[in-house]
Image (cartoon, rainbow, N blue to C red):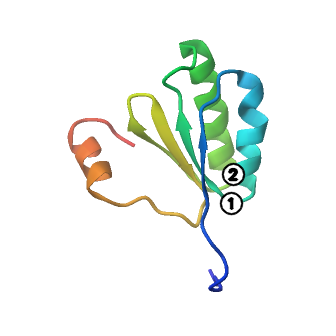
Amino acid sequence: MNMNSSSQLQVVLVKPERFENVSEIADHLRSKHAVLLNLENTDKNIARRLVDFLSGCAYALDGKIKKVAVSAYIITPYHVEIVGDLVEELENNGMYL
């Protein structure tokens, strides 16, 4: 991938309370922005629907979704790789991403 020096990765932080927010989140992914999805205050049923829908979006865009905490996920476009000790630690403790 050819990236010029003026291009910048953006991470959008979202804390949705309703499923209706899902199209706005999906638009960030379509714009090749990574999304940090905080679901700690989201109803469990709505959170499940959001994760299911956004998992499909990530798959369709060749991206990835990874759980980074109990109620938080990072969804990345195809050109972004998640690396670091936290990912390895989570995987070693039985939380497969």
Indicate whether 65 appears above or below 41: below
Marks counted in the figure total 2
Q: Nearer the viewer, residue 58 or 5?
A: 5
- Left or right position of 26 against 87: right
Q: Which mark is residue 29?
A: 2
Determine whether label 1 and label 2 are within 8 Å by CB.
yes
Q: Quadrant of residue 93?
A: top left
Disc 1 crowd rating (10 Å Cα; few below 14, some 14-19, many 20+) is some
- Which element carries disc 2, helix, strand or loop? helix
In the image, residue 97 lies at what x, y percent?
Answer: 39, 43
Name the residue located 60 percent from the left edge and 32 percent from the top edge. 15
- Which element carries disc 1, helix, strand or loop? loop
Disc 2 crowd rating (10 Å Cα; few below 14, some 14-19, many 20+) is many
Kindly identify the amino acid type of the residue bearing the numbered disc 2: Leu
In the image, residue 7 lies at what x, y percent?
Answer: 66, 76
In the image, residue 14 lies at what x, y percent?
Answer: 61, 38
Indicate whether 5 appears above or below 77: below
Q: Identify residue for label 1.
A: 32
- Left or right position of 1 against 20: left
Separation of marks 1 and 2 at Cα, in angstroms: 5 Å
In the image, residue 67 lies at what x, y percent?
Answer: 43, 39
